[in-house]
Image (cartoon, helix red, strand yellow):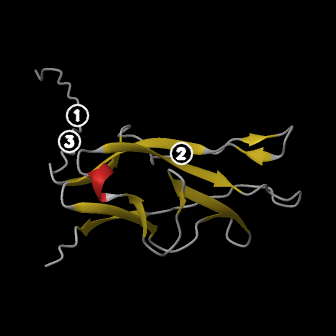
């Protein structure tokens, strides 16, 4: 006679940044299945935001979008997205988002994603994948 068995699969993940350089969201689930809700009164999509903790003990931090400007798309049509870190709007060119002096002890900045207002003909399911690249910019030493 066979005994009844039961099992549970538990997936565990830990992401431990280095003490010298890191840039990551405080919410470890940010970026997984985010939803921009459509407001039927204003005709606009809700914005997304997340606080990032950042540190670079050896210089400043630049950020850029891996594939240039981001957009929601349905395969044939697109809605532009504006992605900013603090007050810096990101595109395909690296831009400083944390100066050397502020990044050395560590800081927090908010990443915000806003969509342009969809036109009346833009309906259906739209998706986007945006990759933000954070660069460790070494401090320049002058002789």
**Residue 35 visible in the current orientation:** no
Direction from residue 50 to residue 105 in the image, left or right: left
Contact, mark 2 vs mark 3 (Cβ under 8 Å): no
Q: Position of residue 138 (x, y in %)?
A: 22, 69
Contact, mark 2 vs mark 1 (Cβ under 8 Å): no
Q: CA distance from mark 2 to mark 3?
A: 21 Å
Q: Which residue is mark 1?
A: 10
| Residue drawn at the location 23% of the way across and 51% of the way down | 104
Direction from residue 85 to residue 37 in the image, left or right: right
Q: Which residue is mark 2?
A: 34
Disc 3 secondary structure class = loop
| Residue drawn at the location 68% of the way across and 42% of the way down | 46
Disc 2 or 1, which lies upstream in sequence? 1
Q: Which residue is mark 3?
A: 14
**Residue 141 visible in the current orientation:** yes
Circle 1 crowding by C-alpha within 10 Å: few under 14, some 14–19, many from 20:
few
| Residue drawn at the location 22% of the way across and 67% of the way down | 139
């Amino acid at each position: 006679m066979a005994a009844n068995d039961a099992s549970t699969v538990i997936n565990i993940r830990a992401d431990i940044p280095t003490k010298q350089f890191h840039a990551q969201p405080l919410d470890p689930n940010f970026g997984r299945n985010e939803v921009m809700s459509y407001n039927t009164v204003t005709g606009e999509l809700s914005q997304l935001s997340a606080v990032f903790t950042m540190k670079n003990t050896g210089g400043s931090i630049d950020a850029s979008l891996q594939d240039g400007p981001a957009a929601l798309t349905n395969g044939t049509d697109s809605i532009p997205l504006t992605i900013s870190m603090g007050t810096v709007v990101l595109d395909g060119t690296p831009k400083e988002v944390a100066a050397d002096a502020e990044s050395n002890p560590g800081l927090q900045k908010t990443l915000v994603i806003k969509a342009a207002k969809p036109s009346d003909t833009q309906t259906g399911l739209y998706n986007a994948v945006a990759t933000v690249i954070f660069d460790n910019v070494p401090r320049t030493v002058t002789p």
